[in-house]
Image: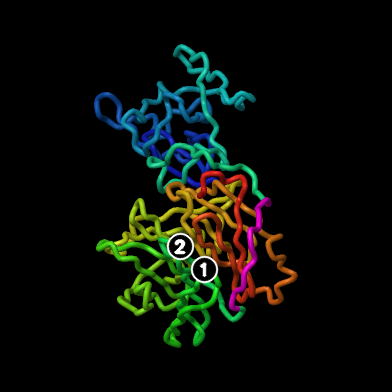
């Protein structure tokens, strides 16, 4: 994925770079003599450059490294223009193992001793996504670098095996579990007793809706509410948490055919976080439901992660189920980078679940455990993650 992707036309060069490259290049194309029009000191066009009479000694390239004093960060930097007699002949060498740039000779100028550079790799803690680079937070204590397969099952409990689970949440006081399920003509909104795991109240959705993710939040008036989105109908609902009465219906859009998959809530920012099965997370304002921003989700190895499904906000991270995967990844909501990854394949192995569509899908943060289930599962699990000491 670290492909060439970036072209900027300067006054006397073309600037090239790529996705997650630790360098940029200033280049010329000798066969394109009309590409640059350079003004000389009198303001006239340089005849040598524009008329084809002057010849360049050689094709010049300049390696631009992060941290270099000559690093142009804008496409039209004021100092980019140089007359032909000022063009440097630059010798490019590979970086040494310490990450320092080798000396670069400058014709007619004093050589710099060394330029310290930092190579930012895809799994580096200092490599935020493009959308939010300036706002990237300090590295968090819980950042991992390898996927974890260790967790502790506290309890296995019953779950309705007819529930095509799409959303799972605890109430703010932990005294109710809310579940929303999918499939046309079979989508439901439910209250579940967290002690007995019996369904206390179940409301059928209209047959034209395919229910998806849901989340508990507190509205501007201090009322606890349940919000649910739908798959293809671009329609969301807000429910009274006590009666499951529908209080509001609203329309929304996302990037992938305007689908809705998962939703969770960040109370500190008063924003909803939404998935649509793509590699993007969408952030909505709590009160206006307007989209505030998006982030692109990447794994430890830097690759994009799509198929993001049910979501849960936990300890400042957005934890995501991935459709047809037993991985749970927890991403930084500012950068989109995965900072915790869990392999849950041993929780209930896929070869014991029957149909391949009976996937892990459902994460709810309790007071002292995480509740996990899946689509058409006959069970739920209370689990803890020993490595995540700040979760509860």
Q: Is residue 84 above or below residue 23?
A: above
Along the line of sight, which residue is nearer the eye, 128 or 243? 243
- Residue displayed at 52% across by 56% down: 319
Residue 45 in view: yes
Q: Is residue 103 above or below residue 215?
A: above
- Residue displayed at 48% across by 53% down: 314
Q: Earlier in the sequence, mark 2 or mark 1?
A: 2
**Circle 1 SS class:** loop
Tag shown at residue 87: none
Where residue 325 appears, as percent x and y from the top left, is 64, 63
Q: Is residue 371 above or below residue 104?
A: below
Q: Which residue is mark 2?
A: 174
99 left or right of 217 in image = right
Q: Quadrant of residue 223?
A: bottom left
Where residue 15 appears, as percent x and y from the top left, is 45, 38
Tag shown at residue 194: 1
- Residue displayed at 61% across by 45% down: 387
**Circle 2 SS class:** loop
Residue found farthest to the top: 110
348 left or right of 270 in image = right
- Discs 2, 1 touching: Cβ within 8 Å: yes
What is the image's colouring? rainbow
């Amino acid at each position: 994925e670290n492909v060439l992707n970036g072209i900027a036309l300067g006054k006397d060069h073309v600037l090239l770079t790529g996705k997650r490259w630790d360098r940029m290049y200033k280049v010329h194309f000798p066969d394109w003599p009309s590409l640059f029009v350079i003004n000389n000191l009198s303001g006239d066009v340089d005849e040598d450059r524009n008329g084809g009479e002057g010849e360049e000694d050689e094709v010049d390239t300049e390696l631009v490294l992060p941290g270099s004093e000559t690093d142009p960060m804008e496409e039209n930097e004021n100092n980019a223009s140089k007359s032909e007699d000022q063009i440097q002949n630059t010798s490019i060498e590979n970086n040494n193992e310490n990450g320092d740039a080798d000396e670069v000779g400058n014709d007619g100028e004093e050589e710099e001793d060394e330029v310290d550079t930092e190579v930012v790799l895809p799994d580096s803690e200092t490599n935020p996504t493009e959308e939010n680079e300036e706002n990237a937070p300090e590295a968090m204590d819980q950042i991992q670098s390898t996927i974890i397969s260790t967790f502790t099952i506290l309890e296995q409990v019953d779950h309705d095996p007819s529930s095509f689970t799409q959303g799972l949440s605890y109430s703010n006081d932990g005294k109710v579990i809310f579940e929303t399920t999918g499939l046309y003509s079979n989508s439901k909104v439910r209250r579940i007793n967290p002690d007995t795991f019996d369904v206390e109240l179940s409301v059928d959705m209209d047959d034209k809706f395919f229910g998806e993710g849901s989340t508990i939040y507190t509205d501007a008036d201090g009322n606890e509410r349940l919000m649910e989105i739908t798959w293809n109908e671009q329609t969301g609902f807000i429910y009274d948490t006590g009666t499951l009465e529908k209080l509001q219906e609203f329309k929304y859009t996302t990037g992938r055919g305007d689908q809705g998959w998962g939703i969770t809530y960040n109370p500190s920012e008063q924003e909803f976080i939404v998935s649509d099965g793509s590699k993007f997370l969408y952030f909505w304002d709590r009160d206006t439901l307007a989209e505030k921003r998006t982030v692109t989700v990447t794994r430890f190895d830097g690759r994009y992660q799509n198929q993001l499904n049910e979501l849960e906000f936990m300890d400042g991270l957005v934890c995501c189920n991935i459709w047809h995967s037993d991985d749970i990844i927890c991403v930084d909501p500012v950068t989109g980078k995965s900072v915790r990854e869990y392999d849950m394949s041993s929780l209930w192995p896929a070869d014991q679940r029957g149909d391949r569509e009976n996937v892990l899908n459902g994460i709810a943060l309790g007071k002292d455990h995480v509740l996990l289930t899946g689509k058409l599962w006959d069970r739920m699990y209370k689990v803890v993650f020993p490595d995540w000491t700040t979760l509860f």
